[in-house]
Amino acid sequence: MLDELLAAWIARQRWFGGKGRPIDELSIDSDVELTPGLRHLIVAIWQEGSRDRYQVLLGERDSIPDRLTHALIATVGDLYLYDAVHDADRMGWLLNGMAHDETSGGLRMRHVPGVTIDTSQRSLVLGAEQSNTSLVYGDAYICKLFRRLIPGINPELEVITALAARDAPHIAQPYGWIETELDGTDTTLAIMQEFLATANDGWDLALASVRDLYASLPEITAAEAGGDFAAESLRLGSATARVHHELAEAFPTDVVEIHEIKRMAEGFRRRLGRAVAEVPELRQHVSTVEDAYHEVELHTSEVPVQRVHGDYHLGQVMRTPTDWVVLDFEGEPGQPLAERKALSSPLRDVAGMLRSFDYAARHLLPDSANIRAQAQELEPRAQEWADRNRASFLEGYVEGGGVITRGDAALLRAFELSKAVYEVVYEARNRPTWIAIPLAAFRPRPV
Ligand SMILES: Nc1ncnc2c1ncn2[C@@H]1O[C@H](COP(=O)(O)OP(=O)(O)O)[C@@H](O)[C@H]1O
Ligand SMILES: O=P(O)(O)O[C@H]1O[C@H](CO)[C@@H](O[C@H]2O[C@H](CO)[C@@H](O)[C@H](O)[C@H]2O)[C@H](O)[C@H]1O
């Protein structure tokens, strides 16, 4: 009975990765009481023969206060069962657990050695559209609870701990984490970091700039518009290069030899094949993408590889009063852990951010009925904004010590198109009205 109610509830959650496919079966693999009124569940969801596991923090109360009715999952007998992430009283227990390195019901709550955790901070769920759930404690900490569980230490924890140990700039300090054993492997359930209370999300800042350009007179260029973003893009490029440098110092690096480059192209193709099978709109662009992948095979020098961010976009960077900070080093949600930790060319992140400038420039075109009427008129402005900020970002990247050679053009383009292929699938599953944005990446480019 609880299984069915949970399945119906999970299917509606933003963080549920299996949207668009029916849930065939849900089973509760683990259900432990952490403290009275708070249970930790690991549920397995079967869809089309494959299984994904998710964690749920289940609150139990005899009566439900108004502030929690929106989080109600089910009533079973006299008990109200609800999504406990919305309950600051219950979530305070987790903070306390991390502060005191407690273990309960197989969950190990830990803090980074040397930091002191202020347990008086009350939590709120961050409203952002996310693949996970983040709790903000006061304005001190942000604790990301991973929803879909993959056995192993989360790459984000690994990366920020290693970079913080090097005093690397451009990251948010780690404070703590929660882990358990899944399939006999230590598995990260949550990561707590410094909350950047005075910072702004890169995506929001970029959109403000695009809106400003849209609203300005037609004769005003992107460079002249009041909200020009190019100086920020330049700075972001430099910060990105520095983060890549720190990652290369903190983790092993390697090179892909020329004779192995074909395998990189094959990796791109496998992803394309899977995407076309899922999203038919991609079929008409296959030859454009294939051509770009073929160019990669003609690469004439070895390709340096290292740990990278892996899912780099404007929503993963925040502007503090003094500089850019990079968040969320966990790779693309939904990919196998080995792939998310695999060494890759830093150009992959560069390409991710270039795509994001395209997204920011275009997303207002199809999204608002009001603006859609003017879409044709605004399209050149969108292009101008994207071109200007993409160029600034690349300039900043090179100024900051990042390496992009002339011979890298084909690889960079292939990474961009591969990201666009991923995005088409992502949008088809999560935000179908946005699918035109990544599809625009396959249009012929001016020569
Ligand atoms: N350390 C932080 N300080 C302030 N806000 C943050 C911090 N980390 C994340 N955020 C906010 O949460 C949003 C989503 O965070 P992110 O780590 O990218 O989660 P997800 O992987 O679920 O997308 C970010 O876009 C940002 O607005
Ligand atoms: O931030 P997440 O780790 O959840 O990343 C996923 O969701 C992102 C959207 O929130 C998605 O990013 C795409 O949309 C962004 C605008 O919302 C845009 O800036 C990015 O360039 C675009 O890729 C990301 O791909 C996905 O993995």
Image: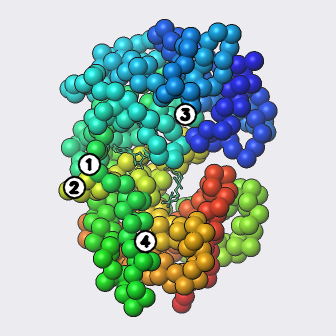
Q: Which image quadrant: the N terminus?
A: top right
Give the Cα separation between the discs numbered 1 and 4. Answer: 22 Å
> Who's the residue at 20% across and 56% down the image?
322
Q: Residue 359: give x, y in percent of width and height.
A: 51, 66
Task: Examine the image and state in which quarter residue 230 appears.
Answer: bottom left
**Residue 302 vs residue 342, the one in the foreground:** 342
Amino acid carrying label 4: it is Arg
Q: How crowded is mark 3: few (under 14 residues within 10 Å), some or many (20 or more)?
A: many
Give the Cα separation between the discs numbered 1 and 3. Answer: 27 Å
Give the Cα separation between the discs numbered 1 and 2. Answer: 7 Å
Residue occupied by mark 4: 211
Task: Examine the image and state in which quarter residue 375 appears.
Answer: bottom right
Please, is residue 437 above or below residue 54 in the view?
A: below
Q: Is residue 419 visible?
A: yes
> Looking at mark 2, is its residue's CB closer than 8 Å to ligand 1?
no
Residue occupied by mark 1: 198
SS at mark 3?
loop
Please, is residue 422 above or below residue 27 in the view?
A: below
Using the image, tell me which numbered label, if any, was put on residue 383.
none
Q: Residues within 10 Å of mark 1 (few under 14, many from 20)?
A: few
Please, is residue 131 above or below residue 296 in the view?
A: above
Residue occupied by mark 2: 321
Q: How crowded is mark 4: few (under 14 residues within 10 Å), some or many (20 or more)?
A: some
Q: Upstream in the sequence, badge 1 or badge 4?
A: 1
Q: Residue 442: give x, y in percent of width and height.
A: 62, 74
Using the image, tell me which numbered label, if any, was put on residue 147.
3
